[in-house]
């Protein structure tokens, strides 16, 4: 009976060590840090043990192998007599001892596999952090007791690894791919909402997309000319009620400064004509090169007092204008953009209307297209059309890419205004 009790204790010990091995290894550091910040001392112990993972695993292998060997020695003596008595009721031939031993081995192995391995490891995988904080103190104590053997076997292992020129330490790096994989997993199981998933994905695009993908292009900039009449100025403010307007002298290549629309509104409220006086023009303008990424542009606005920036190319020619709202909308999306400003409108389950200035990353995300060719050559879907066609597009020009038909639907001069994208069945 004492042998049977020893088997039970060995199975329990094996279960504890198996749960410890899986739970300590699978416990997520991010969640443990949150628990530690909330005052959990056990979570902090688990993090410390994970930092000494080599010693922990060495102790674990020593313990598990010791339990397995003891189980084999004691088990054969403990179960074989009982199984032999049962079998002798039906069979008493020359192979009685061998059959009893084989059945004893099968029963003992099955008990260890089920109760000392599979079942505890499944429990540890389901709730690794909960199991880890409950057994961490015990595991640290056993590791300390077995430290001489741990140092011996770790030393021998390191010697073998160095002999084959294999690193002895694993580099802990959290890459962008790791975070994206976690995002995808969270989106699939529903723990990450669609809006949250898109927002985080847009943040990663800040270092990839250039400022040209969100700016208002040159031909769409509304500005005041010093020669504009009162009626022209009033009409521009009515049609395009912006807070600030550029003031030019003969065109965008000769910018005098900027003026707030409220300055003109004050004149109108006083009964005067809507005119621009040079004393009202703010000559302190903020310029940015078109090669900046969105992340760099946001950093530049941190030290700027102006609400907008003029975008210039390498020849100092004005190519567009961008506001802080434009930069924020690039990753905040619908959180700060009105519904009627959507650049991608789904007509039905297999077709979309897309504005020409829509960033190519937004198109990729909406249509679930993994890649576009030579992404560095263009920023928008209109730029993609021009790049593929190798010329300025005409209405009804089209081509097929990744199972989608891209067709020019509307043009404004030479600018691509709208594109129809249809999924080919």
Image (cartoon, grey):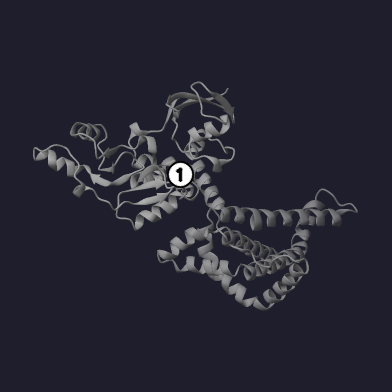
Tell me residue 195's x, y (percent).
41, 41
Residue furthest left in the image = 271
Q: Which residue is mark 1?
A: 197
Q: As rendered, which of 203 and 2 lies closer to the eye?
A: 203
Marks counted in the figure total 1
Height in image: 14 above or below 343?
Answer: below
Residue 350 appears in view: no
Res 250 quadrant in image: top left
Label 1, secondary structure: give it: helix
Quarter of the image containing the C terminus? top right
Q: Residue 198 in the image: x percent, y percent? A: 45, 42
Quarter that holds the N terminus: bottom right
Taking the image as shown, residue 123 lies to the left or right of residue 281, namely right
Q: Position of residue 136 (x, y in %)?
A: 54, 67
Image spot of residue 284 (x, y percent): 29, 53
Please give the name of the residue rendered at 77% of the width and 56% of the height, measured from the top-left corner. Answer: 105
Position above or below: 8 against 281: below
User: Looking at the rendering, which quadrant does residue 94 occupy?
Assistant: bottom right
């Amino acid at each position: 009976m004492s042998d049977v009790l020893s088997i039970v204790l060995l199975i329990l010990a094996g279960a504890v060590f198996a749960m410890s091995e899986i739970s300590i290894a699978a416990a997520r550091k991010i969640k443990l840090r949150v628990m530690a910040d909330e005052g959990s001392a056990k979570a902090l112990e688990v993090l410390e043990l994970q930092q000494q993972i080599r010693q922990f695993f060495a102790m674990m292998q020593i313990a598990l192998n010791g339990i397995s060997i003891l189980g084999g020695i004691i088990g054969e003596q403990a179960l074989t007599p009982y199984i032999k008595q049962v079998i002798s009721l039906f069979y008493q031939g020359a192979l009685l001892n061998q059959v009893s031993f084989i059945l004893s081995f099968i029963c003992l192995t099955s008990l260890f596999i089920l109760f000392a391995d599979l079942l505890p490891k499944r429990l540890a995988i389901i709730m690794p952090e909960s199991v880890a904080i409950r057994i961490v103190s015990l595991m640290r104590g056993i590791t300390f007791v077995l430290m001489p053997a741990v140092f011996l076997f770790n030393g021998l292992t390191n010697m073998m690894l160095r002999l084959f020129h294999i690193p002895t330490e694993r580099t802990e790096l959290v890459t962008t791919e790791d975070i994206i994989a976690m995002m995808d997993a969270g989106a699939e199981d529903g723990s990450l909402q669609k809006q949250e998933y898109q927002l985080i994905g847009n943040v990663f695009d800040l270092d990839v997309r250039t400022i040209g993908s969100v700016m208002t292009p040159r031909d769409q900039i509304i500005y005041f000319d010093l020669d504009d009449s009162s009626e022209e100025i009033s009409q521009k403010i009515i049609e395009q009620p912006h807070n600030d307007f550029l003031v030019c002298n003969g065109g965008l290549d000769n910018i005098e400064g900027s003026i707030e629309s409220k300055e003109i509104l004050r004149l109108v409220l006083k009964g005067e004509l809507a005119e621009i006086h040079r004393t009202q023009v703010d000559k302190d303008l903020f310029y940015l090169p078109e090669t900046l990424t969105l992340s760099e542009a946001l950093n530049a606005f941190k030290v700027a007092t102006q609400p907008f920036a003029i975008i210039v190319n390498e020849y100092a020619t004005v190519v567009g204008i961008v506001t802080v709202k434009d930069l924020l909308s690039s990753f905040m999306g619908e959180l700060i953009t009105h519904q009627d400003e959507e650049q991608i409108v789904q007509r039905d389950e297999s077709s979309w209307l897309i504005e020409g200035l829509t960033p190519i990353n937004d198109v990729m995300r909406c249509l679930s297209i993994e890649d576009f060719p030579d992404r560095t050559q263009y920023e928008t879907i209109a730029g993609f059309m021009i790049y593929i066609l190798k010329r300025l597009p005409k209405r009804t020009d089209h081509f097929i890419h990744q199972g989608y038909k891209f067709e020019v639907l509307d043009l404004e001069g030479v600018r691509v205004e709208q594109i129809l994208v249809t999924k080919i069945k």
